[in-house]
Image (tube, rainbow, N blue to C red):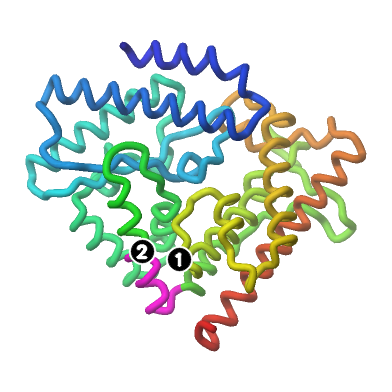
Amino acid sequence: MKYEEIRSYRDQQIPAVINDHFKLNLLHDRVITKVIDLSVNRIEVRNGPPPCSFSFFVMGSAGRFEQSIWSDQDHGIIYEQQSDEIKDYFLDLGKEISEGLQIAGYDYCDGAVMSSKPLWCKSLSEWQQQLSRWIQDSTWESIRQLLIFIDGRSMYGEEKYIEDLKHLVYQSIHNGPLLKRVLTNTLHLKKGMGVLGQVLVETHGPHAGLLNIKETALFPYVNAARLLAIKENITDTSTLLRLDSIPDRLIKTSTKELYKQQFLKLLNYRLAHCDNKNYESGHYLRIGTLSKMQKNEVKEILKNGLALYRFVKNLVEKVDNHGDE
């Protein structure tokens, strides 16, 4: 099999799942897994079998099971043992997977969050050290990298590696306490609604007249659910599963259901009403083509996302000031 054949498979299957968030993301998982399998086989032919057990994991929207029609790459590798030869082996594998994913329709990550880069391809002990450094540094950039890692989901190999590392991160954040520092990293949210209740669209550039739903609508839900996951030691990565796992003592069941319904509606609006010609255009909603009822629904989604984020912000600030309950 070739990567081009996997791309053909993806293109053939996309029309059947283009309007269903869950089926679409299951397709992405199948395509990514096909690429990994082919990459592992090619590296085995070239360099021999893997020198030790490892895990390949995805992050970003793939890690959260929240990809749209197009998606870029965010992934890493954790391998068990450490040596220069082993490092070279897995960096070569990471490069092969990155190239395969690019051919299969997944753009390279602009921020270089890929297993072909040494920062995201390390032994288990090196990952422990790196995560500890990020926590100790507590700079905006190191916290950003921690948050990227926390959305990681194993796609191949030893799933336990990333779960154990996440628990290490959560424990360290709680012992810090660093939760408020993590909150600060996610405070900048693009306003989606004006003081008069109007939807705020882009005023210039290629997306003028469109609503940036990634920054105005998705981020409040995603960031709030991730913060709650850290606080409650929840290792689920999808926003829907994170919300579902929040204890009732924090958010009652009916309110959680509302937030989940609103977030799922948002994901479906993205599929139905964004251009989706490429990765970037899939983040901009054609608000002008919506009916009055749909516009009101989008406003409700925006309001509820902001309400959830403000609730979590207040909760984190309270915990940081007075200690956990």
Horizontal side of 114 relative to 303 (left or right) equals: left
Q: Nearer the viewer, residue 250 or 270?
A: 250
Nearest to the observer: residue 265 or residue 307: 265
Taking the spot 35% from the left edge, 55% from the top edge, the residue there is: 163
- Residue 58 image offset from top left, x and y in percent: 40, 41
Amino acid type, mark 2:
His
Real-space Cα distance between discs 1 and 2? 7 Å
Residue lying at 40% horizontally and 28% vertically, measured from the top left:
32
Residue 116 lies, with reference to residue 12, above or below; the image says below
Q: Main secondary structure of the magenta part?
A: helix
Q: Amino acid at mark 1?
A: Asn
Instruction: Say if mark 1 contacts mark 2, CB within 8 Å.
Output: yes
Query: What's the magenta region?
Result: 168-178
Magenta-colored stretch includes residue 216: no
The relative height of residue 318 versus residue 285 in the rendered view (above or below) is below
Q: Earlier in the sequence, mark 1 or mark 2?
A: 2
User: Which quadrant, please, contains the N terminus?
Assistant: top left
Position of the C terminus by quadrant: bottom right
Numbered circle sitting on residue 233: 1
Residue 3 located left or right of residue 252: left
Among the 4 quarters of the image, the one containing residue 175? bottom left
Q: Residue at x 51, y 31 (%)?
A: 26
Magenta stretch encompasses residue 176 = yes
Q: What residue is shown with label 2?
A: 167
Label 2: element kind: helix
The answer to which of 159 and 116 lies nearer the viewer is: 159
Q: Outermost residue toward the bottom?
A: 322
Where is residue 225 shown, x and y percent of the image?
A: 58, 59
